[in-house]
Image (cartoon, helix red, strand yellow):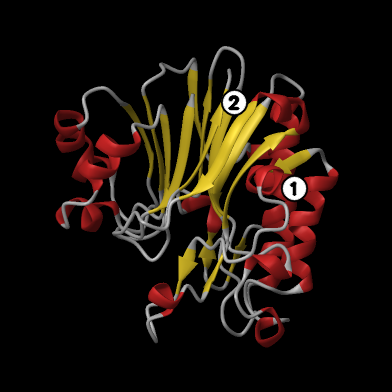
Amino acid sequence: MKIYSWNVNGIRAVEKKGLLEPFFKQHQPDIFCVQETKAQEEQVADDFAQLYPEYEQFWHSAEKKGYSGTAIFSKIPPIEAIFGLPDDLKEKYQLDDGYGDTTREGRVTTLEYEHYFVSTVYTPNAKDDLSRIPMRQHWDPAYLEYMKRLQTEKPVIYCGDFNVAHTELDLARPKANKGKKGFTEEERSGFDAMEAAGFVDTLRVFEPNTPDLYTWWSHFGGARDRNVGWRIDYVMVHESLRELLKNAKIHPDVLGSDHCPVSIEVSL
């Protein structure tokens, strides 16, 4: 089974560029998780149902139009679609701030299947001035607690744009960016906590020491052409699924967004 994740930075824009259909044809994901859809379901679902009829669609859009949002396209019928974080976790953690209420931005979509869960997340950005670090220190543990809760029921696979480079291997210029947005100790410790909870960074299972594997590039200075990037998009699985992993990849040749897709193949 092939699971893909892609921050499309506006799914209508990728479709308009004519780049979504060739992606589906070439890669044929069984489950396709999308972040930063920037679309309301009613704006896209009918058209996409005609274009990609083999997929069921599950959209979780932000209340603010043209902003954030996640979705999952699935060839495999799920038992249930779950949108957002559980109410008790929204109450437990402070998830709104001066920028807005992150629980109203369509940031989490989760599908339950017979033997596993698949969840996708669009993690809030810390902002250039790090003013949203306090939010991240609530968001990261809230989402992790949710994944740990699901794991008590059946194995969990989760993926998306985590808005953090975990180690110095995960960005082109670690020294210049240390302590800056996406590479602060606070954000990196949130990733450490996921690993401590038994979740595995799938790419590093197969490429533990390989540099220059990035999933996001700035629009400026020809960063993508020069591969001056960051790895901030991940597929995580619980340790119990490690032996079922067949591969984990990034796909920098897929254009249409400032991010590229990431994927795993797993025997489930």
| Residue 93 appears in view | no
**94 or 72, nearer to the observer:** 72
Q: Nearer the viewer, mark 2 or mark 1?
A: 2
The residue identified by callout 2 is 117
Secondary structure beneath dot 2 equals strand
Q: Position of residue 244 (x, y in %)?
A: 66, 24
> How far across and down, in percent of the image, does residue 54 sit?
26, 22
Visible residue check, residue 186: yes
Q: Amino acid at mark 1?
A: Lys
Q: Position of residue 181 (x, y in %)?
A: 62, 77
- Local crowd size for mark 1, using a 10 Å CA cut-off: few (<14), some (14–19), many (≥20): few
User: Are the residues tagged 2 and 1 within 8 Å (C-beta)?
Assistant: no
Q: Nearer the viewer, residue 254 or 38?
A: 254
Residue drawn at x 75%, y 40% is: 199
Give the secondary structure at mark 1.
Answer: helix
**Image height of 179 relative to 56, above or below:** below
N-terminal-most mark, 2 or 1: 1
Figure quadrant of residue 178: bottom right
Query: In this picture, is 31 found above or below 43?
Result: above
Residue type pointed to by label 2: Phe
Q: Kindly identify the residue that appears in the image at 56 percent across and 61 percent down.
A: 213
Up-down relation of residue 22 to residue 209 (above or below): above
- Residue, disc 1: 92
Q: Is residue 51 left or right of residue 200?
A: left
